[in-house]
Amino acid sequence: MVSIPKNNTLMAPPEKPRVRFAPSPTGYLHVGGARTALFNWLFARREGGTLLLRIEDTDVERNRPELVEGILEGLKWLGIDWDEGPLFQSQRLEMYRAAAERLLASGAGFACYCKPAAYAGGDAAPGGAADYEGEGDDEGAKVKKNIACPCRDLTEPERAAKQREGIPRAIRFRAPRTGATTFEDAVFGPREVQNVEIEDFVLLRSNGLPTYQLSVVVDDIDMRITHVIRGADHLSNTPKQVLLYQALGAATPVFAHVPLILGPDRTRLSKRHGATSVGSYAEEGFLPEAFRNFLALLGWSPGGDSEFLRTSELVARFSLAGVSRTNAVFDRAKLEWFNTQYLQKPPVEELLPYVEAELRRAGLWEGSQASREGAWFARAVDLIRPRTRLLTDFTGWARAFFTEDFDFEAEARAKFWKDERLPAMLEKLAVALDALPDWNHDSCDATLRGLAAAEGVKAGLLINATRVAIVGRAVAPPLFETMVVLGKDRVVSRLRRALPVLSSR
RNA sequence: GGCGCUAUGGUGCAACGGUUAGCACGCGGCCCUUUCAAGGCCGAAAUACGGGUUCGAUUCCCGUUAGCGCUACCA
């Protein structure tokens, strides 16, 4: 028999949800952050709500202001647009201080004069166990960690004395020592934690700067955030924040904690695992929509078996109810598969701008035939794209397809230009093709096969040799389709240009 | 250590008491193709373990194990 939590999380949410993505500029936009941003964005767009961008830069030590631009760029590349912000916490410090003072005045908070990490078991090194075992009598008896700060019971004279000594003061939250704190999580369900497990956490540091716990709650209240969608690493700290909402007299939002993204070794994804910044995926030649599709399915599912979901479908089908509770391993191979799908399935016109940008980046665009003949560029891209996995793969085809400046690859020559009868036959082929009144797949096909028959050789010999002659490579799209796309003039001239090279072997 | 979360093939998901446990990636094979891809077909591959509850558990409960998270005057 579970009692129904009596807090305000069960109130009907306002018409239009307001969500936020709140990265801290201590690094680039990484895959995990991008996925959180994406979920917030999908939710906002699905619900017709508002997405706000907030930069959590209250940690002066680690904060790198110059990284903010990169984060914004990463979001833009991903196609995630926000409606408000970016707002910087570093510009809202007065608000947090005021809130901390209010909490202090109301008794919900108290002044703390401890040295940082002084009381929590004596040794609160980052990441280290901060408790201790009872010595003596009962072997193995554990002494419960003292999570209440001694300063919480300071009398006013004692406090004033510390103050006079000039000891730096922090403000801590006076965590309740009885009862439990409950809240509703849209992903993990109803949560309840015993208040004795909650320590007297710091609200305002002795340097006057707020901690995350304080600033996040003050901001989410001030910005009227209705749904807090963030990584599951924040799940354990949520009760503290719920306590703060209550102490501040505000309604709690709906929380939705999304599972973490792991590396192949099942530890939290980090630089050790290679590329983790979205920027690196952009540079590698992934399409933003493919990346979105892949990311959306990491910890979320629409419920059925469909996987190739264009962004509009993602938006239409997104729901917090579909978010999983299990951490997911980032699988690069699957990402690449998604990319091939997005390279192939959408109308070719959608792809053109990306290919053009890629060619420009490689310096292969200016002055190329592709830049001059748009329709032809489209047909060529359409022919090549089934053979690409990344956008950058197009540069490998670019010279042969979009310019007249290409080489005959050595391996291709070695493999398909061995036969000594080839020069004579290709010369005849050039003449025959040149005389063709209609230039299309079938006429090219018939001409080549006819010649092969007349010469008494297999068509394959000519097909492979001709392919090398007109695009310089052994691995290429089907010959006759390539010939149609290149056009008669290019094919014939390329064939003739190949002849001397061919004979010289 | 404490507290919490999680647990379906190698990976991502589906099945939300009744299915021969489904799909996709990856892997292997075949077809198509005188190149290479793409595509099609086939195959190997999973309910962590142990107890319950139930006519019936992948599904609900408990325990074990494992992984992860939190336990900072980081966010």
Image: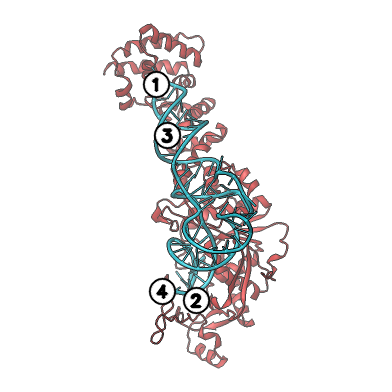
Which chain is home to disc 1? A
Evaluate if marks 1 and 3 touch, with contact meaning CB atoms under 8 Å apart: no
Relative horizontal placement of residue A300, taking residue A424 as reference (left or right): right
Which of the 4 quarters of the picture holds residue A96?
Answer: bottom right
Q: Nearer the viewer, mark 3 or mark 4?
A: 4
3 and 4 marks on the same chain: yes
Q: Residues within 10 Å of mark 3 (few under 14, many from 20)?
A: many
Q: Residues within 10 Å of mark 1 (few under 14, many from 20)?
A: many
1 and 3 marks on the same chain: yes
Residue B36, percent from left and from top = 40, 29
Residue type for callout 2: Asn
Name the one closer to the observer, A309 or A277.
Answer: A309
Residue sitting at 64 percent across and 71 percent down? A245
Q: Nearer the viewer, mark 2 or mark 1?
A: 1
2 and 1 marks on the same chain: yes
Mark 2: which secondary structure?
A: loop
Q: Residues within 10 Å of mark 2 (few under 14, many from 20)?
A: few
Which chain is home to disc 3? A
Mark 3: which secondary structure?
A: helix
Tell me the CA gap for discs 1 and 4.
66 Å
Tell me the CA gap for discs 3 and 2.
54 Å
Tell me the CA gap for discs 2 and 4.
20 Å
Mark 1: which secondary structure?
A: helix
Chain the render paints red: A
Residue type for callout 1: Arg
| Res. A125 mark | 4
Residue type for callout 3: Thr
Residue type for callout 4: Ala
Which chain is home to disc 2? A
Q: Which residue is mark 3?
A: A395
Sequence-wise, the earlier of marks 1 and 3 is 3
